[in-house]
Image (cartoon, rainbow, N blue to C red):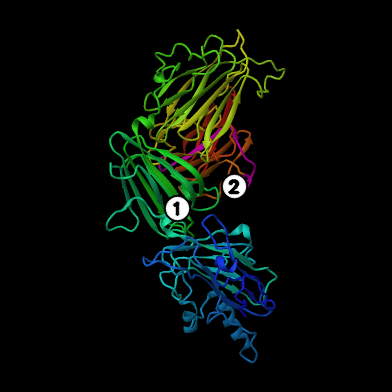
Amino acid sequence: MKLCGNGKSSRIACGDGLRVQEGESYNDEKGVAAPNTTGRMPAAFTYANAHSGISAVAHYALNCVGVTSTSGTSDRQDGLLEMHGKQSGNAQRYAKPEGEDSKRQEEENEARSIEHLEYNGEKQAAVNALDCATILQILEPIIRPIVERFSSSCTRGDFLKLFLHLESKGISEYTPWSGVLCGELRDIPQVLYSSRSTLILEFHTQFPSSNATGFSGTFRFIDRRLFEMDGLLVPGTMCDHEFVSSQSTPQYGRFYSPRYPSSYPKNIRCSYLFRARLKERIRLVFEEISLQKGDLSCLNRADLIKVHDGTDSGAPTIAVLCNQGTEVEVLSTGPGLYVEFVANSEWPGQGFKAMFQFQPLDDALHPEPDKVPGAVTGNPKYSVIGPAVSATTSLCDIVYNSDTTKTGIVMSPGYPNPYPSRTHCTYDFQGRGKERVQVIFQDLNLFHSQSNPNDCEGVDSLVAFVNIDGKKDKIDLFCGDIPPRPIMSTGPRLSLEFQGLTSSRHSRGFKATYTFMENFGITTGRQEGQYPCAFVFNSNETRNGTFTSPNYPGLYPRATECYYFFNGQSNERVHLHFHFFDVEGVLPCEAISASDYVEFSNYMTRDRKYPRHCGQLKEFDVYSERKFFRVTFKSNDRLDATGFNGSYVFLDEEENYTMKIPASNGSARHGEAFVKLVN
């Protein structure tokens, strides 16, 4: 294999061999744009197919030859970059052997290509100088179309091996690698990061060669100090940090998973303890979470983030985060928060970056409702009439906070009298911990002149918003005189916006009850504090009963995961009957279709005997095979639906039972189901 490049910034081809686009010095004097932290990528690398009948190994090591100051840091953020691409000692051609031992030799050569067994002294010398000149920089290569996938594990065929966490400048046969890439662009993480100043890519080709196009990429160097933690490392630990509020420390800062933005190590457990002062609360925002792809339940993930509403892992869990997400907000109820990050997966992700803020209690509460001009108090005992509104502008923007009261009444201006024209009111609800905001409407009577009562555009209306990815997202729009079903927030915040365009002496407006609740509107079972939304049903407490999705019969909240654990005696099994089932999604209820789903299992882990359920389904039954049974409900942040209403009964291994199907707001039919369980 021939490594090509003439020291210019143009791409040079050498037949079908390796091609490298490299820069001689990348400085402004030569008219070549230097990189910067805003995303310009001046250097690139690429690979084209090797000759037919050749297996090969090639190494790419990225180097920054920058001007450094006496302190060892770079004088300029961009530095002077050069792409090096020496052929290392084992990046040689394995020609097709001849002679009586040709078959054995061919197998050995193939093994070298696949298993990377051939390393020698030349390789070490070749990569020794290929590192970043300043230890305060890390690398960010971006890979574009990758090599052909021959197997699901990437261990056969053509692949790219990654060395992202190098402690020294060179590698040997004992150097652990970080990952292997193969397949197409959609199969791989396109952006990678080194954890230190050196990064090596090892490219392997298989005999015979394929028709895959190879890969190309760009890279840049980033100041590592951009990802420094603001907390203090706990002595004697590798990744436990403490953040304490005081007059001498900043009231806000940042924290990260280990080695961020590079992938975190395997088999780690890190803690982040936040201690606010007595009259302060803590706000966390996980700006980016990238643990694993997919939509598996956090219950079945090896890598996850747990947030406890206190100062240790024994405090109630108010958030469990896994998979991927952005702008997830968590608010403490008191002066302490304890974050656990556990990573036990085989293939670690990028991790997370987050910010924290110590909020003075007055700022955290916002103005109390009775101190807002024209507002009503949050206490229903004193809420008699809606807020007043001037003739030209609205004075009815109100904040309801769970620290002030857990329940109350919200009304349109002047209710039950008609509201004035040109009214615009905003009602913001702010919960804490794992609280969700539920709003139940008692009355809705808005002026509607349209012939179609379901058309709410351009008429008097009430709009509900929740926070999704850090932005306000509309979840429902109400108008006319039909009271809507209960609504529930996705997290601790919810907003209502009332707009009265016209005035009518017959339009009363609206009246509703709001509640900050921790049980997600699920009123049966015993809530388990180990998870934000988990309920336990024990046969020694109740042999039969009902269970529902969150906020049923209203729309279930988005981005929510709830567990239902059924525990029977040793000789018992569980029978579930779903009277109503409407969960947004299409079969087979996978992430590719952005489906919400309900999942069943005889274990805490996944049970592939039971397919996921979603969509609008007729009544159906599910039976356990053991005394323990688990139901998982998981919604994403896209759409929502009514959810489900079900009944359960614990039965002996062989027992006849007639189950009465309860009525539920007209959504379930009356009748009986005859059940016989046979083990």
The region drawn magenta spans 566-593
- Residue at left offset 38%, top offset 57%: 268
**Is residue 251 shown in magenta?**
no
**Is residue 581 shown in magenta?**
yes
Q: Using the rendered image of the protein, determine whether residue 345 is visible from the camera's viewpoint.
A: yes
- Residue at left offset 59%, top offset 86%: 105
Q: Which mark is residue 335?
A: none
Q: Is residue 104 left or right of residue 562?
A: right
Q: Which mark is residue 303?
A: 1
Dot 2 surroundings within 10 Å: few (below 14), some, or many (20 or more)?
A: some
Where residue 26 sits in the image (x, y, percent)? 56, 68
Work out which residue is located at the far right of the displayed protein and give it: 451
Disc on the earlier residue, 2 or 1: 1
Q: Which kind of residue does numbered mark 2 sit on? A: Ala
Where residue 653 sits in the image (x, y, percent)? 47, 41
Q: Which kind of residue does numbered mark 1 sit on? A: Asp
Q: Is residue 125 left or right of residue 107?
A: left
- Residue at left offset 47%, top offset 51%: 301
Q: Nearer the viewer, residue 515 or 633?
A: 515
> Disc 2 vs disc 1: Cβ atoms closer than 8 Å?
no
Q: Is residue 51 above or below residue 577?
A: below
Q: Nearer the viewer, residue 627 or 5?
A: 5
Work out which residue is located at the far bottom of the displayed protein and give it: 99
The secondary element bearing badge 2 is classed as helix
Q: Using the rendered image of the protein, determine whether residue 664 is visible from the camera's viewpoint.
A: no
Which residue does the numbered mark 2 point to in the structure image? 591
Q: Is residue 247 above or below residue 157?
A: above
The CA distance from mark 2 to mark 1 is: 18 Å
Q: Quadrant of residue 72?
A: bottom left
